[in-house]
Image (cartoon, coloured by chain):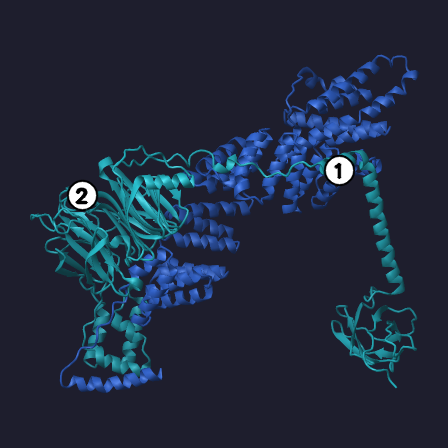
Amino acid sequence: MAEEKLGMKTQVPASIESQKPRPKKAPEFPIVEKLNWLIHLYYIRKDYEACKAVIKEQLQETQGLCEYAIYVQALIFRLEGNIQESLELFQTCAVLSPQCADNLKQVARSLFLLGKHKAATEVYNEAAKLNQKDWEICHNLGVCYTYLKQFSKAQDQLHSALQLNKHDLTYIMLGKIHLLQGDLDKAIEIYKKAVEFSPENTELLTTLGLLYLQLGVYQKAFEHLGNALTYDPANYKAILAAGSMMQTHGDFDVALTKYRVVACAIPESPPLWNNIGMCFFGKKKYVAAISCLKRANYLAPFDWKILYNLGLVHLTMQQYASAFHFLSAAINFQPKMGELYMLLAVALTNLEDIENAKRAYVEAVRLDKCNPLVNLNYAVLLYNQGEKKGALAQYQEMEKKVHFLKDNNPLEFDSEMVEMAQKLGAALQVGEALVWTKPVKDPKSKHRTNSGSKSATLQQPLGSFQALGQAMSSAAAHRKIPSGAQLTKPPSLPLEPEPEPTVEASPTEASEQNKEK
Amino acid sequence: MAATTSSPDSDSGRAESNEANSKWLDAHYDPMANIHTFSSCLALADLHGDGEYKLVVGDLGPGGQQPRLKVLKGPTVLTESPLPALPASAATFLMDQHEPRTPALALASGPCVYVYKNLRPYFKFSLPQLPPNPLEQDLWNQAKEDRIDPLTLKEMLEDIREKAEVPLSVQSLRFLQLELNEMEAFVNQHKSKVIKRQTVITTMTTLKKNLADEDAVSCLVLGTENKELLVLDPEAFTILTKMSLPSVPVFLEVSGQFDVEFRLTAACRDGSIYILRRDSKHPKYCIELSAQPVGLVRVHKILVVGSTQESLHGFTHKGKKLWTVQMPAAILTMNLLEQRSRGLQAVMAALANGEVRIYRDKALLNVVRAPDAVTSLCFGRYGREDNTLIMTTRGGGLIIKILKRTAVFVEGTGEVGPPLAQTTKLSVPRKTRLYVDQTLREREAGTVMHRTFQTDLYLLRLRAARAYVQALESSLSPMSATAREPLKLHAVVQGLGPTFKLTLHLQNTSTARPVLGLQVCFLYNEAFYALPRAFFKVPLLVPGLSYPLETFVESLSSKGISDIIKVLVLREGQSAPLLSAHINMPVSEGLAAA
């Protein structure tokens, strides 16, 4: 500064002297915008070192008057993570050009990145006064209001942005707002429009497919996920969602082939290994299933679904001690799910801990209000323990649920479940024909379960299906005891010899079904 | 040259390498060519009318320090001359209908266009000055006539800057930066000058004037920093038309003829692309991108735009998006590849990973791999070869490749169909003998395992509970669990002996209630230790504070024996301690007391 002052003092006499002999022109000012085009070219090709060098040179030559150089330097600071320095430079630009909306927009964006959303909305509103038809301002205002949780204002701004100019980002943001507010239908509506506008955007297609999946509209879900995979065959989100749908339909090999792509892209994805494990489970490769599920459990130790599946597979493998541990852990994380208690009860039954098994069944019956399988299994246990009254009560409760399900959803029950119910009914001497008339008339072999009507999570349908099958197998295993129990009664009744052969024949049939399965 | 059928592209690295080699001849590569430029500063033309096409390079020089105009023939530099400023764009065009047909060279630099004929300076066109702000001019006139003082001048200029739409001149901006004591001299030095506002050229291209022929006369189209497009007459260099844009143009594309019908497309700094037509002074259509445009190429009737989101987009002339292709790296520059012998027009995109990718619409036709990142691209007739690709690299290298005459670009099928990852096996651990044995054992002895585990678990819980009760009953815990006196105690022993300092840190952990009436008692073996204060009262304990209570311990034994000292905290009048702690005393290092 002192040097500059000295320079100025020296210059003044020279200027005065030179004016008298001959008037001398002052040097021309350099053009402030001379190198703006070069700064921009380096910036857009991300050559930030060269860009900063040119900026420095230009600011020196123009003594800090080149607004665009300051602007781009601020952008680069922001890209490098120096948000505060960036904000200060943008404010300098706003001083140099008060009527320029771009500078205010960048100030607002820096405030947004610093987490000061309220201040950012104020600056964006100032910028909106200067430029009425800027979709970016409306869009960014919508984003800021979203962070401030003022969702109605956010929606208004985002809709304004879409009217000015349509962009995928705006649709995605609107969809997220509706999801945050729990409005699934409106979110689907928004994503539909987004897909119409941008038919090849795999992110939009995948999101829409997942939303349809949550609603249970499987046809549309599969359609959109398929489109996403057409444009981007390695989209792992779409692959996981489509794969889980394939698993629900029993196409385990196709799903496994698809999962290989995700295994290459994201080898440490817990949902991936969970789904792969359940594919192997569906193919009856139980050891491989356990390996994959344990890997998934290692990657996500607190995911109750993986623990649920591990418990299920270990029940299938008759490793009841291990199943007990996994199911206990799952119950710790998800204590409100009746099905988990039912499976735990099955494990405890096989571990000959009848008292705790009964307690687990009581809890399962209390929590699960619509699954007749819980009551059926409980009835079988009570019957095996010789508590006919309790078994009868549970049997009747199961009948109520079956009636309810039949009235609401014409579903085919699991054939093994039907058979077991019939045998138990006969054993309890209940009016069998009155309840099971329809299934007897239509002996369809479709393996569909009543759980299909539930709105399940991504992995849940497969788990439920297998859980029912496995639970039926476990329940069927208990029929050995009723046979023995029944054998003790023949001496007292003359008619006993006639039903006895039937009971003996059915165990063989059931075991055959078990092998077949 | 052997005639071979080109195979389609495939994703395999070796096949790709063979594929790249089979289409292009490596004519020249000089990593030390010292050419630093952009695609807009490259041009191919028959400058001397001898049928030999030359390469014109507007060279920025390393670090933008020594701009030069270079003309290359084959791999060598034919002529080289310095430039007054950095070149923004270079173009060749025909000025007139005279024979022979030798094109002129136009070089845009700063506010001027330098026109060369036969590589000699021919004409210099300067952009007209912008009209100054009338208020600003009036203020400086007053200053010239000494009818205004510097302070008032400063205030009024700031007012103009705050409100006016027309920007201030550099002179006024410089003045507003000055300190108070510098203003007088500045005004005296500059007040007699007329204020100027000058803009600069940001981009340039050529537009046919009235005929669509290859050798027709062309106009120059300039893009300027003050958001305008100018069309210049090629003979008189007068401005034929002027169009306004909402933002500064960066890339230009034209089609049609000026006198008949034309279409101008400008990619601008605000991330938008504007499309203008003959009779419009303002854009007719607008394409708003989500990111900055990196390049703009017109292929037949499709506009191909590269964006900083590492993607290519295809648009119609009315702004409808047709397709998007993702790139593996950032796009550095783009240009048109036109193989006239086969009627092929394609887009070349140079990426930051050294690749040059060639696309027809969204289909990848070819990948050329360069040893360095390619920063400028040019395709056309060079020398006497019709299809030559010329590239310069970030480090200043020059690469020349000639497309084989037999080369056929076929759309690759390698990227269609299922991904390669689908054929790889999942890494699932194998079933081992040990695992099977463990499974069988669990099947047989599951019940015993379960019962043993449960029994052991109950025993563990029982032992933990008993230990807890015992700690509570004997007050062995350093934490007091009673509701009325929540206390915490821990002890520190300092020193080497024979004299030690024993410091107790006692803390009242309740939220509001002070504790008073406490006593501290030490139990120790009198044969080993002597404590002058083995019993003392504790002052009132304020909640939350930790009180250090000090006492000294004298070691009496000279045989290196250490023992335990027990600390008890009691309430006055009660014999059961509230809490206690055991202190393991260290061995005395010093001599015993006499």
Q: CA distance from mark 1 to mark 2?
A: 84 Å
- Of callouts 1 and 2, the N-terminal one: 2
Q: Is disc 2 placed on a helix, strand or loop?
A: strand
Name the chain letter of the residue that bears numbered label 2. Answer: B
Q: Quadrant of the C terminus of chain A?
A: top right
In this rendered view, identify the residue nearer to me: B390 or A138: B390
Image quarter for residue A171? top left
Amino acid type of disc 1? Gln
Residue A335 shows in the view: no
B510 vs B83, left or right, is right
Residue at mark 1: B438
Residue at mark 2: B261
Residue at image location 79% in from the left, 29% down from the top? A379
Name the chain letter of the residue that bears numbered label 1. Answer: B
Residue B474 in the image: state x and y as whole percent.
89, 64
Residue B541 in the image: state x and y as whole percent.
79, 75
Q: Is disc 1 placed on a helix, strand or loop?
A: helix
Image quarter for residue B542? bottom right
Q: Residue furthest front?
A: B1
B109 vs B449, left or right, is left
Mark 1 in CB contact with mark 2 (< 8 angstroms): no
Q: Quadrant of the N terminus of chain A?
A: bottom left
Chain B hue?
A: cyan
Q: Is residue B526 above or below residue B455?
A: below
Residue B423 in the image: state x and y as whole percent.
51, 34
Q: Are there few (<14), some (14-19), or many (20+) residues within 10 Å of tag 2?
A: few
Which chain corresponds to the colour blue? A
In this rendered view, identify the residue nearer to me: A228 or A190: A228
